[in-house]
Amino acid sequence: MKFNNAFFITGTAYAGKSTMVKLLAEKYNGILCEENYHDQLLPELNSTEFPFLTYTRDLEDWHDFIRRSLEEYKAWMDDVSYECEVLELRTLDGLKE
């Protein structure tokens, strides 16, 4: 898959990603995909294909979210990031000429 003039901005929480994307979109008349824009796809996601993205959707007790070990939380963050990339690439694939 080849894209011209595409930027991928990643980073940790509160690193300024959303602010940077907004400013770049304004400056270069780009498409702004706001924070968590892929959440609109969440109701339709299959929990077998996207177990980490659907984790919070299918959570029965929010306490389970905060009771995880640091290792479990890090693994979830890494894996949910990967699943977001999969969705984003699918979205981009639909936009290419």
Image: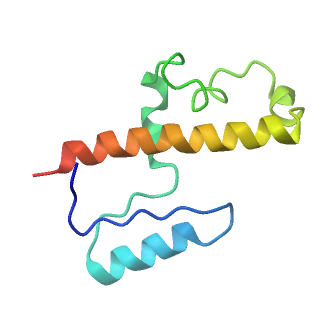
Left or right of 75, for residue 80: left
* Residue 80, horizontal then vertical, whole percent: 59, 39
Where 11 sits versus 42, above or below?
A: below
Q: Residue sitting at 53 percent across and 61 percent down?
A: 10
Give the total of numbered labels.
0
Residue 17 horizontal/vertical position (percent): 55, 68
Asked if 82 appears above or below 33 in the picture, the reply is above
Give the farthest residue toward the left: 97
Q: Where is residue 62 shown, x and y percent of the image? A: 81, 29
Q: Residue at x 16, y 51 (%)?
A: 96
Quarter of the rendering containing residue 7: bottom left
Q: Nearer the viewer, residue 66 or 50?
A: 50
81 sits to left or right of 94:
right
Question: In which quarter of the view is residue 27 placed?
Answer: bottom left
Left-right relation of 48 to 56: left
- Residue 53 horizontal/vertical position (percent): 57, 32
Q: Residue at x 88, y 36 (%)?
A: 69
Looking at the picture, the colour scheme in use is rainbow
Q: Residue at x 66, y 61 (%)?
A: 12
